[in-house]
Image (cartoon, grey):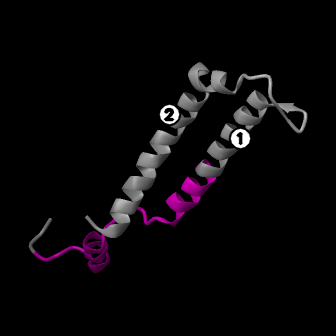
Amino acid sequence: MSRWEAGARSTRDAAVLLPVAAAALLLPPFILVFAAPVYIAGVPLIVVYVFSVWAGVVLCAWLLARRHAEAPDGMDAAAEAETAAGPQPGRR
């Protein structure tokens, strides 16, 4: 497995894990921790938490999309060279 394939696979795995992590962070056990009557600059703590999680998920999705766009299309060097060379004699 080449370095690019491992990078593309880890990016794909992170992209699958991101919505699961976001959903877990927005479930009641986590949200209720921040449901205290505390205000930050006049904004309830729970609102700050929800919007911080949302902004973090958006930022992570943007970073993953950029990383995915930089990765090659999945062809390894040997397959790319074989495709560029054309059909081999004696092979169908």
Residue at coordinates 33% horizontally, 68% vertically from top-left?
Answer: 3
Label 2 close to label 1 by CB (< 8 Å): no
In this view, 92 is above or below 13 = below
User: What residue is disc 1 on?
Assistant: 52
Q: Is residue 8 shown to the viewer in this render?
A: yes
Q: Quadrant of the C terminus?
A: bottom left
Q: Residues within 10 Å of mark 2 (few under 14, many from 20)?
A: few
Position of residue 38 measured from the top left corner of the image (x, y, whole percent): 80, 28
Q: Is residue 40 above or below residue 91?
A: above
Label 1 SS: helix
Quarter holding residue 9:
bottom left
> Where are the magenta residues, as a range?
61-89
- Three-letter residue code for mark 2: Val
Q: Is residue 48 left or right of residue 73?
A: right
Queried whether the magenta region covers residue 51, the answer comes back as no
As drawn, the label of residue 20 is 2
Q: Residue at x 65, y 45 (%)?
A: 56
- Neighbour class for label 1 at 10 Å: few (<14), some, many (≥20)? few
- Quarter that holds the N terminus: bottom left
What residue occupies the far right of the structure in this picture?
42
Instruction: Say which label, 2 or 1, has the lower sequence index.
Output: 2
Q: Residue furthest bottom?
A: 85
Query: Residue 52 at x, y = what percent?
Result: 71, 40
